[in-house]
Amino acid sequence: MDQTVDRQTVVKTDSPLSESEKNAIIGGVLLSMLLAALDQTIVAPAMPTMARLLGHAEYLPWIVTGYLLTATAMAPLYGKISDVYGRRPTIYAAILIFLAGSLVSAMAPNMLVLIVGRAIQGAGGGGLFALAQTVIGDLVPPRERARYSAWIAGTWAVASIAGPLLGGTFAEHLHWSLIFWINMPLGLIAMAIINKPLRKLPIAAKHHRIDGLGALLLVAATALLLLALNWGGSEYPWLSREIFGLLACSAVVWSAFALRLLRAAEPLISLEVLGNPIVLAGTLSLFLLQAANIGLAVYLPVYLQSILGLSASESGTAMLGLMLGTVAGATFSGRTIPRFVHYKRIAMMGVTFAILCLGILSLVAGHVSLLVVEVLTTCIGLGSGTTFPVATVSVQNAVDQAHLGVATGVLTFLRSLGSALGVAILGAVALGYGLPLAGENVQAASTAVEALAFVMIFITAAAMLVMALVALVLMPEKPLRGHPEAPVLAD
């Protein structure tokens, strides 16, 4: 299963790329990342139309689940492949796989083919998430890298806002397949932009190999775990034998993967990377932060509709505070990191502020105005957003260039896994307190029961942020590599 690759190329300390070429590459990889991010948000408004025209509405959730499974499972694999074969062929492969999935989805004659197309899309999309951050890590030193994290956060914000608008417009006024056809020209434009300058990036690895068996075990273990998290509480009760069976099988395969990491001549994820305390703490903090943020983003619209009486479209608009606050927090953090020696304090203060705001929201959840909710959720986004640049830069700064792709892939993987886990945990809390799952009839429960359920949801999200804060506190701080002349303005 192992494929040995002999690479003599070494990393150059002085990049031959001009500033315009660097900007072209960054613009191209962010455009490709936007494609993958859009396809996580654009399909939701069109799903009823797809079900009506293609039939088999009972399989509708797999349009989302299929994409999530493959995108999450493939992220670490892309990081390793890019370290061995180089960024350009790997990102090209990811874009082409994504476009192939878009083509299958756009031409799907039935629901089964559409789900297969979405899974293929995810197999490419997972690479685009990891590779965008890895390529930026290649181009700029860690001290200057943080400010680009704001661009990544902005890309996610654009996808979060534009995706539902485009999806609804295409499905209602044109045709649902345009959701996927639009990817074709955008993907080709991204490839054309990065084609020439990306050739100049050196290959970081030397005498490395791809562990095929380890990759297979990782994909299988992740798929089983995500199936359990997606089906628990919705398709099957959490205590059902089906969910227990999936979790048990996932645990067995994860154990086999861990054993493979210990015994393989060159494991898929380097033990040097996994054993780095900065990588462990940084990825754990982002995992927990993403669990809280995505879980909150899923249940906040339900809260706005059931407690404050907003319509579906009004609750979507009210979500802008949380999303834009996150982008603003990431932008502030990214621009501030180069000015501080103890840069992780930025994230620690931000997460502490977010915990405080979530605590206030839980106290007033049953009797609060929309204005107060908007202020609090915006502040939660501001505080939590500061962690994304700090965690990303810290992890990338902790490893050498040969392991940059692997470390970034692990970070992306745990971030995606945190999203699924956060929704599952808050979903279990909602069901435990009698609140229907997100997307169901929120009027089925009494106002008092709903209020208590949301109080517990907000408290649970705050507890996740507390654990993320602990991980940040425990994370060692390594001086950022960068240009010698870069000033340090504050301590």
Image (cartoon, rainbow, N blue to C red):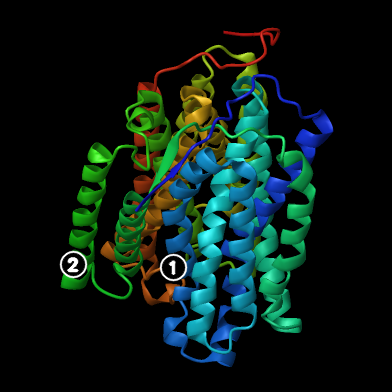
User: In the image, is residue 155 above or below residue 351?
Assistant: below
Can see residue 69?
yes
Q: Secondary structure at mark 1?
A: loop
Q: Position of residue 102 (x, y in %)?
A: 63, 71
Q: Nearer the viewer, residue 261 or 38?
A: 261
For label 1, the crowd category at 10 Å Cα-Cα, with few meaning under 14, some 14 to 19 and many 20 or more, is some
Which residue is rendered at x = 66% and y = 72% of the image?
180
Disc number at residue 3? none
- Say which amino acid is labelled 2: Gly
Which residue is rendered at x = 70% and y = 20% of the image?
14
Pointer 1: what residue? 438
Q: Secondary structure at mark 2?
A: helix
- Say which amino acid is labelled 1: Ala
Disc number at residue 245? 2
User: In the image, is residue 82 above or below residue 351?
Assistant: below
Can see residue 312?
no
Residue 224 occupies quadrant:
bottom left
Answer with left or right where residue 54 lies relative to residue 32.
left
Can you say which quadrant of the picture contains the C terminus?
Answer: top right
Q: Nearer the viewer, residue 311 or 218?
A: 218
Which residue is rendered at x = 60% and y = 77% of the image?
104
Answer with left or right where residue 242 lies relative to residue 122.
left
